[in-house]
Amino acid sequence: MKHSRILILAVLAAVVSCQGRKTTTVGSTPETEQRIERLLSRMTLAEKIGQMNQLSGGGDVANYAEAIRNGQVGSILNEVDPQKVNEFQRISVEESRLGIPLLIARDVIHGFHTVFPIPLGLAATFDPDLVEQGARMAALEATAQGVRWTFSPMLDIARDPRWGRIAEGSGEDTYLDARMAEAMVYGYQGRQPDTTSMAACIKHFVGYGAAEGGRDYNSTFLTERQLRNVYLPPFQAAVEAGAMTLMTSFNDNDGVPSTGNTFVVKDILRGEWGFDGLVVTDWNSMGEMIVHGFGTDRKDVARKALEAGVDMDMMTYGFLSHLEELVKTGAVKEAAIDDAVRNILRVKFVLGLFEHPYVDAGKAAAVQYAPDHLAAAQRSAEESAILLKNDGVLPLKADAVRSILVTGPMADAPHDQLGTWAFDGEKSHTVTPLKALQERFPGKVTYVPGLRYSREKRDSFQDVVAAARRADVVLVFLGEEAILSGEAHALADLNMKGSQSELLAALKAAGKPVVATVMAGRPLTIERDLPNCNAMLYAFHPGTMGGPALTNLLFGDVNPSGKTPITFLRTVGQAPLYYSHNMTGRPYNGETLLDDIGMEAGQTSLGNTSYYLDYGAYPLFPFGYGLSYTQFAYSGITLDKAVYGPEDEIRVSLTLANTGDCDGTEVVQVYIRDLVGSITRPVKELKAFQRVTLKAGESRNLTLTVPVSDLAFYGLDGVKKVESGDFQLWVAGDSASGDPVSFQVE
Ligand code: BGC
């Protein structure tokens, strides 16, 4: 009773008025809702259940023809050949009884043919506009081949770099993740639906990134409050941005697998947020509830998934095989199936699939790798690279260079620089650093790979060292191949694999300037490598245009502006370590480290605070960190008020000056801390950011705003609200810098 009232209220709240017409969270009109009802009323139970079934394509069309013709398929994933897509659609539209088009789905995660940096790299840009533009281009390319649904964006907050899927998300921070979520939803779907709209699928709902030990698919134990304060907000932001679909995750949280989790799907997503889009399972995650020990057999888990609020089954065949029987025995109500089908049809109608089921296969190729797509991919790679160290060697001077040694396993790894989930990016179109450097400096580049792949072990690097001695500068490209991150690719050791660290040390010993560029799917533990290079640029797998982007950065045509979207650890044993942790009762205060303890220390107290005896309490690089070839100075940070009301907007003013001698872009970040709460609060939380480009010597007055309502959280009573009291606010270029200003909320 209580739930249904909440549901009705939430749906009403979610309904927005658009030029006098009502729309739902996914943007359907009253006319569309009528079309859905008319179609639904003509459907047999079997046809309804057919809509709830998603199959994997990729094979011979004939294999699926009969099932499609019989109305047993609502969606196909993994078919990107436009001719085959058209043939699937033709069978569905012309040969099935009701002619309902199929939803063709694909994991278009960071670009389609033109591959952009992996999502973790996109987050490092702190540039939602650029990210939206990239997602739009991915949609243009994918929809041209008939793909109208992507399983992206992944919104899993990830605070453990052992987890391979950290590559696929926006990192550790709730606020940054939410901004990236909105950008990608707008980009994929377009601000107005048309034939180039590709439905976004926000995933994995929910908590998947908190896998214990960073081991993929592992259990999570997130409390409701953590879910609501940290893990759910990006999903809610994406729903509010109009995300059409959502995917349940593989993990069980506190014992409940997501695909059968009524609380998160039915109560929160549907009830509180009023989501009326399509909920799909992850691949066989319905069936895996049996393996979890959460259901006896496929029939049992099919019922549980439906009851939880799932509409479509990806590859378990649970709905297809058992729902009819479950309805006939009264275990499941047909009304629940009707609701699921409404959600599926709604997306198909909003996408315009009934009007435009086919693509112009002849035109599809022309859209791929369009020059503006390549340019945006390059710019994204440029903005995403993070300068972690520079003793002044960078930027290199192009006209002074006579000989460059290019080395390392990632220098010419066209497939691997694309990163995880780049099914459709072709290595023949990928520009590696080696290729870009050879093109730019003909005759000046010597290439000695040193290591053919990241895991190779070698005892001696005589050939590379000899070449280094002959060169003016050494550009070494290290990191990890695509295969080392992504789904099911967790690592327990985050040091650079193989003999990469030894290669770097050998190069350093050769005595020439060494610039290391790391391309990876996660923040590796690079502390031991930093002393062995004069500069280090960190590029999360940068995609198709990684080579030209990195070349431009190394030679100063573009000034680095990327910032870490995730804390960089000194050693894997520190995981999880993230900037917005709660305040402990015994915060670290610079106490003794192991190396400083004398031989006879015995059991003496070392201060009794929260840190590791061997590694202290701090990371290698904090969240939000990244250098530039210029310097920025923050001054005059003032708030417009000392005391704010709950409806106010905090306006923070400052002067940002570029005090160096080249133009550059700074990501200005605003953090707050709620000093006393009904529950302990994070020591800092990002609440706003802005990319600001300044000419050398220029300074600018800036004002950033934070609505006081953004300080709300779920406190002790489980209600989201702003708690009055004392706060601090920082404006700085990373999460560990700056001095706080104080304010109050009454
Ligand atoms: C992944 C999803 C993906 C799906 C379809 C699963 O293994 O967890 O993220 O969208 O496969 O390819």
Image: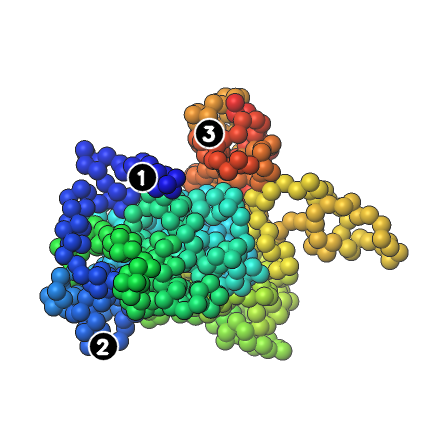
Residue 6 pos. (x, y %): 36, 39
CA distance for labels 3 and 2: 57 Å
49 left or right, relative to 96: right
Question: Would you name the residue on which mark 2 appears?
Answer: 63
User: Measuring 37% from the left and 41% from the top, which residue is drawn there?
Assistant: 1
User: Measuring 61% from the left and 60% from the top, which residue is drawn there?
Assistant: 572
Residue 16 pos. (x, y %): 26, 36
User: Measuring 14% from the left and 51% from the top, which residue is drawn there?
Assistant: 38
365 left or right, relative to 581: left
Residue density around tag 1, few if under 14, some if 14–19, many if 20 or more, within 10 Å: some
Q: In what element is the residue under mark 2?
A: helix
Is residue 645 at all visible to an observer of this figure?
yes
Question: Would you name the residue on which mark 1 appears?
Answer: 8
Question: Would you name the residue on which mark 3 appears?
Answer: 708
User: Measuring 59% from the left and 45% from the top, which residue is drawn there?
Assistant: 581
In front: 742, or 447?
Answer: 742
Q: In what element is the residue under mark 1?
A: helix
In front: 657, or 76?
Answer: 76
